[in-house]
Image (cartoon, rainbow, N blue to C red):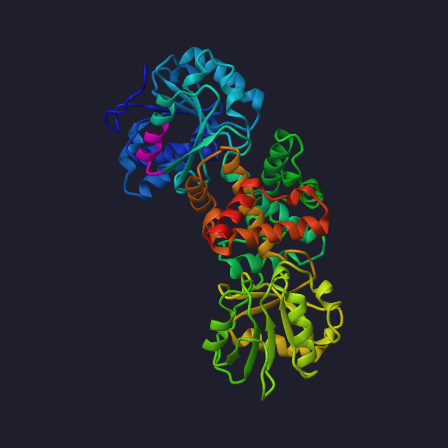
Amino acid sequence: MSFQWITPYSVRLGIVGAGTMGSGIALAALLADMPVTLFDVSPQMLECARTYIETHLTQKSKSYNLTNLSMTDRLEDLSGNGVIIEAIPEDLSLKQDLFRRLDAICPPPAILASNTSTLTVTSIAATTTKPQRVAGMHFFNPAAVMPLVEVVRCAQTNLDTVHTLLNLAEKLGKTPVVASDTPGFIVNRVARPFYGEALRLLGDGVASHEQIDLLVRLGAGFRMGPFQLMDLIGLDVNLSATQSMYEQSFGEPRYRPHPIQARMVGQNALGRKTGQGFYSYVGEQAPEQIPPKMRQCTGLVSLIPGTWAPGMSENARRAGYLVHSNGYFESSAPSIAIAMAGRKDGLRKELVKLDNFLPDDVPLLCQCVDVTITEVATWIERPERLAGFDGLFFAGGQAATLIASPTLTPQAKSSIENFVTSLGHLPVWIEDSPGLVLPRIVCMLANEAAFAVQERVAQPDQIDLAMRLGVNYPRGPLAWAKEIGYAHVVDVLEHLQSEFGEDRFRAAYLLRRWARLGQVAG
């Protein structure tokens, strides 16, 4: 027998757990004019939840819906509810015991749903006599505000259960996506590189956590940097999710936790909730760095054409520079020379020619997404005027990643900074590292999303939608990969794997396939 919605009042929604998530789900339901039964073993938790719910209903001029809320510390009072959503701590044995009891108390056609974010729903459903009526319904914090809900179909969940939960999510004003029951579902899985690669970059001394956050926000348009977000989530919560993913995937290296995070959790530096994480939340905060405004300039810019710095020539022209796009001038010397080609596009050959052609005092800026500046410096005779930059994320961002060659002179560095700021970019100097910061993080996000499609976790459009709505990414990772170019993404991953020698950076077969199809179509 399938469960059918008649009107918003035709079913009472049962919620187990009156903590942050449970009370947030209850608020979302009450705002949607649905009656709610909220259960918790703690009368204190129930009272806190009532205060929270009443405050927000009043703010929304819906205080009258408080009459639709019933609170109880008796699990038996959930009998007769059409859908019961569990929102208790992330402990598998605890959830299994609860679902075993709910299975006896709430007979079909009631649907049992878990709000778990990292545990396998199939293992929870296995404790019930009718696992076909069990699924995941994963909300995001704060549940009353965040628009996404992941509906997770486990091994025996039937279509009626999935359709009912999709319908419920829409009635709550949410956008649902359907995911298979795999570790992390969509969002918690695909988001792992956002934190993991940032921690690796920090641990390797490539950049400070402030620099990484700055580049992620101003260079790629994320609302928060990875370290700011870890502080907000709680380092303990984030580490637990990473450890769960690593264990459930039997040691997949892409999900390996980082010692930095573990040490900070050991020190109780958990982020905002303890007043100290990667940032201090006691006293005044450091002022935000403001990107410079583009200014009108004169001078010549010599470009070696290529596909690794899209928009560079247009930006330079907007700033007033005269751009010569074949790399060489027959008369006046350029103010700066820029190489936008990649390793496979003959970058080395072109740089050697340009180095021989340019006067000694002309700085040379080379894209370094698929090659390190240390390697490039060995190709030319005058590396003291050489610096690298992140071409893929230069034109579209407000911050520019720069990398000095080992012998870069102060004069050349100053000239390069002056050029970058004239285009309206904040220069951020980091240490030499394969894939830099943004290409490494974004390409690993795209790779994880491709693995998720390849492994039938969800459809590509559902994954992109989930990442935009669930964690506020500026665009979906698969759409981003298409924009960058699948072949470029694969090249970045191969560069990382070659330099580090780690399976962590292996490209998903599906991503390689898309890259080949793009080349054939092109």
Quick one: 354 or 27, which is closer to the camera?
Answer: 354
Residue 172 falls within the magenta-colored stretch: yes
From which residue to which does the magenta span run? Answer: 165-174
Residues 340 and 427: in front is 340
Task: Name the outermost residue toward the left.
Answer: 7
Q: Nearer the viewer, residue 6 or 354?
A: 354
User: Residue 409, relative to residue 398: is it above or below?
Assistant: below
Q: Quadrant of the N terminus?
A: top left
As drawn, the residue found furthest toward the bottom would be: 331
- Relative to 11, say whether 460 is above or below: below
Q: Does residue 100 show up?
A: yes
- In percent of the image, x 57 and y 40: which residue is there? 509
**Looking at the picture, how far across and down is residue 120, in whole percent?**
54, 26
At a point 64% along the width and 63% down the height, the residue shown is 368
From the image, give the main secondary structure of the stretch colored magenta.
helix
In this rendering, is residue 356 above or below 21? Answer: below
Compared with residue 321, is residue 275 higher up or lower down, i.e. above or below?
above
Residue depicted at 57% across the width and 25% down the height: 91
Q: Toward which corner of the image does residue 165 lie, by quadrant? A: top left
The question of residue 375 being in magenta is answered with no
- From the top left corner, tell me how far across and down residue 282 is, in percent: 60, 54
Q: Is residue 413 visible?
A: no
**Rendered location of residue 516, percent (x, y):** 53, 48
Indicate left or right for 109 with 223 as reference.
left
For residue 322, side relative to residue 161 (left or right): right
Tag count in the figure? 0
